[in-house]
Image: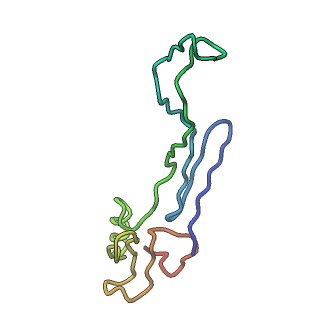
Amino acid sequence: GTTACVVLLRNNKLYISNCGDSRAVLARRCRKVLNPTKIENDSETPTASSSSTATEIQNLTTIPLSTDQNPDSPGEKERILQLGGYVSPPPEPGLSARVWLDAAHTQIGLAMARSIGDHAVKGV
């Protein structure tokens, strides 16, 4: 199976869809003003103008556009359990919880709550 994420911009409106743990993120430029006060130059300093403005830095900030469908996410875990599946916690920090078809976790396990084409776990 696979996961997917699609973003469509049409008529100045974003449409976002995802399946599994694929994520859509928007990067936006933002200004950071280092010195918000106006600095007056003295007469001995050679400048093109009598004053200089605050220093600006261009940075990027991120805005999440979608939510990962992880097995232990609120709503996803309850949905999986209602359909007869099982969810095990992540084996170690930084890894994903897994979806299983059986309580002993011996059958197929998925590291995401939803995916495209995993017919073996389609029921959960």
- Compared across the picture, whether 76 is left or right of 64 comes to left
Numbered-mark total = 0
Task: Say above or below: 65 vs 30.
Answer: below
Q: Which residue lies at the image location 53% right of the left edge and 62% below the top edge? A: 22
x then y, percent, for residue 39 = 50, 17
x then y, percent, for residue 47 = 64, 17
Color scheme of the displayed model: rainbow
Q: Quadrant of residue 124?
A: bottom left
Task: Say above or below: 122 vs 16.
Answer: below
Q: Which residue lies at the image location 45% right of the left edge and 62% below the top edge? A: 69
x then y, percent, for residue 65 = 52, 48
Task: Say above or below: 40 vs 5.
Answer: above
Q: Nearer the viewer, residue 116 or 90?
A: 90
Q: Quadrant of residue 10?
A: top right
Quarter of the image containing the N terminus? bottom right
Most extreme residue toward the bottom is 106
Q: Which residue lies at the image location 37% right of the left edge and 61% below the top edge? A: 73
x then y, percent, for residue 89 = 32, 73
- Compared across the picture, whether 30 is left or right of 99 comes to right
Q: Nearer the viewer, residue 94 or 113?
A: 94
- Compared across the picture, whether 5 is left or right of 122 comes to right
Q: Nearer the viewer, residue 58 or 73?
A: 58
- Compared across the picture, whether 20 is left or right of 45 comes to left
Q: Which residue lies at the image location 54% right of the left edge and 40% below the top edge? A: 59
